[in-house]
Image (spheres, helix red, strand yellow):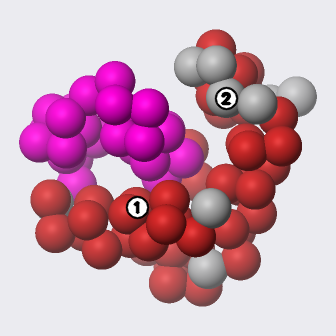
Amino acid sequence: MTQPNLMLYSFGLEPDIIDKLLNLINENEELKEKRTKDKHIICTLLWWKQYLPINEICVTFGISPKTFQNHYSQTIRSL
């Protein structure tokens, strides 16, 4: 298991949900071109589990709110 997966498990997500999330992110060419895998997974997960508000996530990870809403929200809706 890689370090990002350990982080995801520590947030309490079931393994099948984590796998689904990873697959969706890896299959999306637009995300693949514009992301580091860890950043997308962690930002999406933090937002989805409501650990941090969008603005705080954007500041912490250095992404714009528009980018977050366009890319990360699509990933969650696809689950």
Q: Is residue 13 above or below residue 66?
A: above
Give the labeled residue for mark 1: 72
Q: Could you tell which of marks 1 and 2 lies nearer the N-terminus?
A: 2
- Disc 2 marks a residue whose amino acid type is Leu
Residue at x 40%, y 61% (from the top left corner): 72
Mark sitting on residue 13 = 2
Q: Is residue 32 above or below residue 3?
A: below
Q: Residues within 10 Å of mark 2 (few under 14, many from 20)?
A: few
- Disc 1 marks a residue whose amino acid type is Tyr
Q: Alpha carbon of mark 1 to alpha carbon of mark 2: how far?
A: 17 Å
Q: Is residue 64 above or below residue 78?
A: above
Asked whether 44 falls inside the magenta stretch, the response is yes
Q: Residues within 10 Å of mark 1 (few under 14, many from 20)?
A: many
Looking at the picture, tell me which residue is in the foreground, 67 or 2. 67
Residue at x 70%, y 22% (from the top left corner): 9
Q: Quadrant of the N terminus?
A: top right
- The dominant secondary structure in magenta is helix
